[in-house]
Image (cartoon, grey):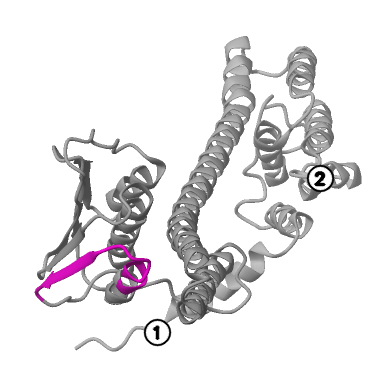
Amino acid sequence: MFGKMPAMPDRVLPVGRWWRARGLVVRDGALAALFAVLAFTPGVAHDGMIMAENARRPVDAFALVLLFAQCVPLVVRRIRPGLCLAVIAAAFAIHEMFGYPPTFASEGLIVALYSVGAYQDRFRRVPGVAGIVAYVVLAVVVAAQGSPERPADFVAFFLIAYVGSWSVGAWMRTRAGQEAERRRQAAGAAIAEERARIARELHDVVTHHVTNMVIRADATTFLAADSPEQVVSGLAEIGETGRRTLVELRYFLGVLDPVDDEPERAPALGSLRDLVEETRSTGQPIELSEVGEQGPMTRGAELAAYRVVQESLTNALKHAPGRRTVVRVRHDAAEVDIEVSTDGSGGAAPRSADGRGLTGLRERLSVVGGELRAGGRPDGGFTVHARIPAGDGR
């Protein structure tokens, strides 16, 4: 029944962007030109500000000069708002004292008052005090010339035109300042959050891989005399770990200062087996048990799950070398459940669950809606348990 509507936004948006790209003088100059045109347009030419109701002279050449003086200064209303108001207010006052007919150009006084309230940065009180004094003098002069307006009318004109316009401009200035401050705080919070995230990532990467390299290097020194073949194998594993570390560090450097269109992808949950094998090659006895099949997961949830296992294995290498560690991963459509348990030596005091790595994991999981529990066991061992929503896989 109805035809297809034209795609107006595709045409309007480029025009709007083009207009916003013009300088302030160009945009405000267009406003000044509009006021000047309307001052000569039948039907609205004399719909202007009326203060004294004392028109007694016909329009002449000087009246035209005053007409343009009340609208042309709007060209600089945002660049030099004080100067703009001074010129327009002086022209308006002379226009009223000479008794010329009303002109639409006098509406420029309202815009100039608003502009001072909104854009005047320095000496904001000077235009206000000078304007009040000038208005009182003008009211006295036009009253002495025989204006029929009463003192209450002059006060009402002052409150509506002067105070009202200025106050609206000051309110808009306050709003703009608050919005700028809100954006600044939001940007600062986003930067701080991103720095914290990258710090957690670097902690996980460096701690895990460097711990592996140190343990392998220590083991290689003991094997140097008896088993050259194992020394060669150990050095090869150290080199492979170092290369893997460089890949991950290169990824995070790409996030901080991207050069390519898309940085390398970070580790995925599907590479847990490689992570376990890498840690197991240091001599740490590790068992991996997976139940269910991994379904679609958000990128954040997948990386969080990987980091949980990585941090837990790193802690096992640092604090419980040579003790049995069990990694249990259970997948279902809604979430992934991870538990990493490391045996103790029996009777040892439980380790604290408040380290930097675990604190970072808690923050990471809270971002994706997950939760983390970690604590010691009676036998001196340690358990990390995480539940992470899978999300929608996008």
Q: Quarter of the image holding residue 149?
A: top right
Q: What percent of the width, then of the height, locates residue 182?
A: 51, 40
Could you tell me which quadrant the C terminus lies in? bottom left
The one of 88 and 63 positioned closer to us in this rendering: 88
Q: What residue range appears in magenta? A: 277-292
Q: Quarter of the image holding residue 345?
A: top left
The one of 337 and 316 positioned closer to us in this rendering: 316
Circle number at residue 73: 2
Q: Is residue 115 above or below residue 130?
A: below
The one of 161 and 376 positioned closer to us in this rendering: 376
Residue indicated by mark 1: 6
- Give the residue at x 52% y 71%: 225
Query: Of the residues shown, which amino acid type is indicated by label 2?
Result: Pro
Q: What percent of the width, then of the height, locates residue 287?
A: 19, 67
Q: What percent of the width, then of the height, locates residue 75?
A: 79, 50
Left or right: where 41 falls relative to 180: right
State the separation of the CA atoms marked 2 and 1: 40 Å
